[in-house]
Structures are given as structure tokens and as C-alpha cells.
Image (spheres, grey):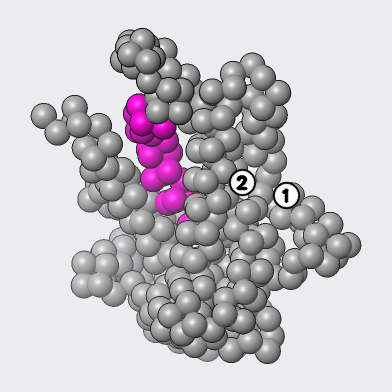
Amino acid sequence: MVIVMTGVATIVFFITRIIPADPVGAILGGNAPIELVDKMRAELGLDKPIHEQFIDYVVGIFHGDFGHSLVTKKPILEDIFTFLPATMELAIVAMFFAIIIGIISGAFSAVKRNSIVDHATRVFSIMGVALPVFWLGLILLFFLYFKADLFPGGGRHSLFIFPEKITGLVLLDAIICRDWDTFKDALHHIILPAFVLGYAHAALISRIKRASMLDVLQQDYIRTARAKGLGKRVVIFRHALRNSLIPVVTVIGVSFGDLLGGAVLTETIFSWPGLGRYLVNALLVLDYPAITGGTLFIAFVYSLANLLVDISYAVLDPRMQN
């Protein structure tokens, strides 16, 4: 994780500095007085040689200081933790959809191999991997919001809903406060973007689950269990299902980290006020500290998810404990 984070921090810093654009000009505008531009560049340290900027950047990271946003004027970590709950909520619900749909469809596809269910599941998986997130989001918005008016067009809740803020997760806060009207409204708003965000991961989980399940069903201990007279449900749910989860857990762990980065497009399409949308706005105005800080945070979550996946192997596979 240390090596990965060091590499990400270095690459992101130099890429943002190599871009042939001036963040000060993007913020102040092209007609700003040259004196004001020079003053702001000096305040931000952009007038220093790039190696000195990099040293200041690394020293700041080790002190927990990612700098201040050029737009909001707030510390980057404060901005991240302000927008993070919305992204985490969206990612958690999307991951829930992906796990439930992916595991169930993959297991049924393996058990009903070469049946209509299997073929339909494989088509579902191929479409999930092939369809771009932005295209799927726009199509669903057009038909389910603009035409059918079944789902809201965007946002976390309706205009006249004022949720109590405890954790920043609207659904969880509504449950804690037993505000069921807010819960229903927030759930109605999150279903469409969460499905769009989680569909590709559901398709991937389904394909991995199917392949893993087919491999497990051909193992000797499965044939032994059947020879002992155990019922089909017992063999599938007690023996095959759990033992085929190890590669699926790998995909789930990596997918959750990927959801945070993948939320950029989904949050933009559905006007979701999360970290992804914050980074998009930072990119548009070349907010260097926000870009680097947000990218580092997502890389950290991604690396942490991989670490937790490695640890979970010992729980799912007793052989790993020896």
C-alpha cells in the first residue's frame, strides 16, 4: 500500500503540473490584471520550481495537509469528508445491488447450465460489461424519468425534504431518526443511479460466480456429497455456494474501490452531490490540490479494499489459515 500510494502521489502531482494550462487563469479569468495573477501564483506556490513544489507537496502529505482548494478555499480533507458521505451511500447501495444480482444470477446460471436461464444471464452479463455508464444513465433517465416519470431526475432527495444530518448518509440517518418519509424519498432517488453504477459490477460478479460455481460443482467432494444421498439444495447451498465465493470476494473488493472512481460519471449525470462530482468540478477549473487530494483518497480506499480482500480469504478458505 505504501508503494502504491507513493507512486500514485508522484504520478498525479507531475501530470497535473505538465498539463499546458494555468489554474490561476482559469479561476481569475483571462482579463485579470497581471499583478493579481502574479500575487495569486506566489500565494499558491506555483511560482516555485517544480521540484520545490513537489517537496512542499510531499511534506504536506506527511503532515496530513493536502492543501486548500482553489475554489472553496477550504482544506482538501474537509471538502473530501463533506462530499464523501453522498458517494459512500451511492457506492454502498450500488454494491448491494451488484452483489445480490450478481451472485444470485451467477449461481442460477451455473446450476441451470445451458438452459434459457443460463443464456439470459450470459446476455445480461455481456450487456453489463459492454454498455458505457454514461449511455446507460442517459437512456434510463430519458425513459424512466422524462417519459414514464417513474423516478426522479437527480439529487439525493426532493427539494422540500430536509433530512436530519447525523452520519451524512441520508438513508441511515432517516432510519436512526425514524423519519420514514425521508427514507422513502431518498430511496426513490438513489435506486436509479445506484443501479446504473452497479450494473457493470453485477455483470462481472455474475460471470465470475458462474465460472467458479461450475468449477466447484465438478470437484470430488461435491460428487461424494451427492453419493452420500444429500439433497440437491444441501449440496449447492452448504458446499458449492460458499466454496465458490473466494474469487467473487476478490471481484467485490476491487469493485467497491472502483465504484468510488466510477461514481464520477454517474454523479455528474444524476446531479449527485458527491466526491465524484466534486472532482469533476475541480478538473474543470484546474484545482490542483483538490484533484491530487481526491485522487489520493480514492487510491487509498482502493488499496484498503484489496487488503481487506486478502484478509477475508482466511475466513472463507480454512486452508489459508495454515
Residue at 57% of width from left, 76% of height from top? 183
Say whether residue 4 is visible: no
Farthest residue to the front: give it.
229
**Closer to us: 305 or 194:** 194
* Neighbour tally class for label 1: few under 14, some 14-19, many 20 plus, Cα within 10 Å: some
**Closer to us: 185 or 35:** 185
Dot 2: element:
helix
**Label annotation for residue 199:** 2
The quarter of the picture where residue 117 lies is top right
Q: Earlier in the sequence, mark 2 or mark 1?
A: 1
**Closer to us: 184 or 134:** 184
Say whether residue 277 is visible: yes
Position of residue 45 measured from the top left corner of the image (x, y, whole percent): 37, 76
Farthest residue to the left: give it.
322
For residue 5, above or below residue 32: above
Farthest residue to the right: give it.
147
From which residue to which does the magenta span run?
A: 237-261
- Residue type highlighted by circle 1: Leu
Disc 2 and disc 1 in contact, CB within 8 angstroms = yes
Nearer mark to the viewer, of 2 and 1: 2
Residue at 50% of width from left, 38% of height from top? 103
Q: Any magenta on residue 220?
A: no
Q: Any magenta on residue 240?
A: yes
Using residue 4 as the reference point, say whether residue 268 is left or right of it.
right
Question: How far is disc 2 from disc 1 in space, using C-alphas?
Answer: 9 Å
Dot 1: element:
helix
Position of residue 17 measured from the top left corner of the image (x, y, whole percent): 45, 60
Secondary structure character of the magenta stretch overall: helix
The quarter of the picture where residue 145 lies is bottom right
